[in-house]
Image (cartoon, helix red, strand yellow):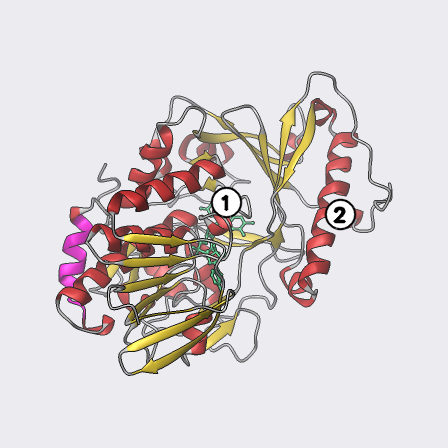
Amino acid sequence: MDDDVQLIVAGGGSAGTMAALSAARFGIQTILIERESQLGGTSTVAGVNCWEPAVGATGLPYEFYQRMREIPEAVGIYSLGRYGSNSPIPFPGAENILDPRFTYADTLRRYGLKGISIEIDKYRQQLHGVIFEPDVWHRTAVQMLKETGCCSVWLNKEIKDVRRKNDKTIEAALNDGSHVAARRWIDTTGLVACRLGARCFLGNNPQNPYLEGEPAGLNGVTRIFRISPVDVPRIEPLADDIPEQCWWQKDFPAMVCTLYPNGDRHCNMLPTFEGNEFMAMPPEIADREGLRRVASYWHFLQTHYTEFQHYRLAKIFPRSGIRETFQVECEYMLKTEDLLLGCRRQSHSDIIALADHARDTHGRGKSHCTELAWPYGIPYRCLLPKGCPDLLIAGRIAGFSKAAASSCRLARTMMMLGEAAGIATALAVEHKCGFPDVDVRALRDLLRRQRVTLESDMESSL
Ligand SMILES: Cc1cc2nc3c(=O)[nH]c(=O)nc-3n(C[C@H](O)[C@H](O)[C@H](O)COP(=O)(O)OP(=O)(O)OC[C@H]3O[C@@H](n4cnc5c(N)ncnc54)[C@H](O)[C@@H]3O)c2cc1C
């Protein structure tokens, strides 16, 4: 073991990058390991470069936004525009348009809505989100991590295996044959936790004890694409292997289409694959099928909605956007009851982040979005895998039931979990204790000092 390394963070997505940043800012010598060539995970390589409204996303997400905003056309605040076939000019789903009247503070609330079909104007007034350039997310993250002077970013390194080397050290084998070890780890991939013996459950597995009566099947998977305006309108030709009459035409979904600051559009089908269908395919087949489905869907858009003839297909993001993988069993498993009670009535004393996104699933016959009345809190114990005192879980794989995960998986909520995990590491190092023994009151105090919102009557601490 390199004695200088105090923390290894597995996975450089939204949660992992913020975990590394927040720990390194407290002087913790950190290595961040990411298998892709970019940081950001789902938010960059899968093209999910939109932050939907999320209560509690103050702290690091706000600072991160401010940094990205320094770059021209890197970020925009959006509002709902046209919605479906009832619009004067019909639209194949929901359109998000940029609205310079709104600020980041306007993107910090979702709760209190009743359903888009019954109060669409309220959605237009209340719901605002952030769109950002994925490359800028990556560059901002690398720069902020560099400024700490305490974090090494290892890109293109995949963790292949993990073992407990002795009672003080967890060691990983990487794809290049090298090994790396540290006493404390934060896992955002699930691999480290599973290899160290934590129980992990795929959402649709009937053995999963954290199902709450929801329909079987995994949340849908989406291959996101980007379109750019062109001067001369036209329908782009289909590749030879894509038939005009598409094999999945009857299942063509609606999409959420969001304007980028540079005039491009971000296209998010709801969804491209059923979750189970995607998981049953070998990865290379699923990858190719995703590209074919985007091509055929794009052809459908151009032929049925003439406005899209003024655009070209500019980019299909390299990775599929997978909404649901598996959850690691943690000391507390957040559940529907927490979401319904809301943080004012939850009895937890260890809440380290707030969330308020609807319970939200996508897929044939099972798409539904159930709004919440109040924000709810996520306890620190959701980050503590059972039986692994030197490991914290951050990100969407943390201790959530399937239903709770469908709500609290938003990227900025994952950034908040990362921020809390990084600060918890600093406290564990300072007090020479395991993660379960971290003083939660001190953790919450430090979070508040970083302007993290922990109480529901603080709508925004900006
Ligand atoms: C289609 C889709 C649409 C969504 N829409 C929105 C939205 O509009 N707004 C919103 O806020 N949220 C949205 N979400 C949710 C949100 O984007 C994700 O839940 C969130 O980004 C997950 O962040 P994470 O850090 O937990 O995981 P990830 O982003 O998955 O990060 C995990 C990282 O670990 C890396 N990794 C995995 N295994 C290894 C390994 N063995 N070795 C090294 N590295 C590894 C991965 O490459 C990845 O970078 C959407 C999600 C999807 C899929």
Instruction: Count how many numbered circles sit on residues in the image.
Output: 2
Three-letter amino acid code of the residue under disc 2: Arg
Please provide percent x and percent y for residue 150: 25, 52
Position of the N terminus by quadrant: bottom left
Q: Is residue 347 left or right of residue 223?
A: left
Q: Is residue 40 left or right of residue 170?
A: right
**Secondary structure under the numbered disc 1 in the rendered image:** loop
- Residues rendered magenta in the picture: 438-448
**Secondary structure under the numbered disc 2 in the rendered image:** helix
Q: Does the segment drawn in magenta span residue 117?
A: no
Three-letter amino acid code of the residue under disc 1: Thr
Please provide percent x and percent y for residue 452: 23, 47
CB of mark 2 near ligand 1 (< 8 Å):
no
Residue 144, numbered circle:
none
Please provide percent x and percent y for residue 223: 63, 48
How dense is the environment of label 1, judged by Cα within 10 Å: few (below 14), some, or many (20 and up)? Answer: many
Predominant SS of the magenta segment: helix
Q: In the image, what residue occupies the spot 53% across and 69% down?
A: 203
Q: In the image, what residue occupies the spot 83% across and 46% down?
A: 246
Residue 57 visible within the image:
no
Disc 2 designates what residue?
Answer: 292
Please provide percent x and percent y for residue 200: 47, 75
- Position of 39 relative to 342 (above/below): above
Residue 104 visible within the image:
yes
Whichever of labels 2 and 1 marks the residue nearer the N terminus, that label is 1
How dense is the environment of label 2, judged by Cα within 10 Å: few (below 14), some, or many (20 and up)? Answer: some
Q: Does the segment drawn in magenta span residue 440?
A: yes
- Residue 462: quarter of image: top left
Disc 1 designates what residue?
Answer: 44
Label 2, label 1: how many angstroms apart (C-alpha)?
Answer: 21 Å
Q: Is residue 306 left or right of residue 40?
A: right
Q: In the image, what residue occupies the spot 42% across and 81% down?
A: 197
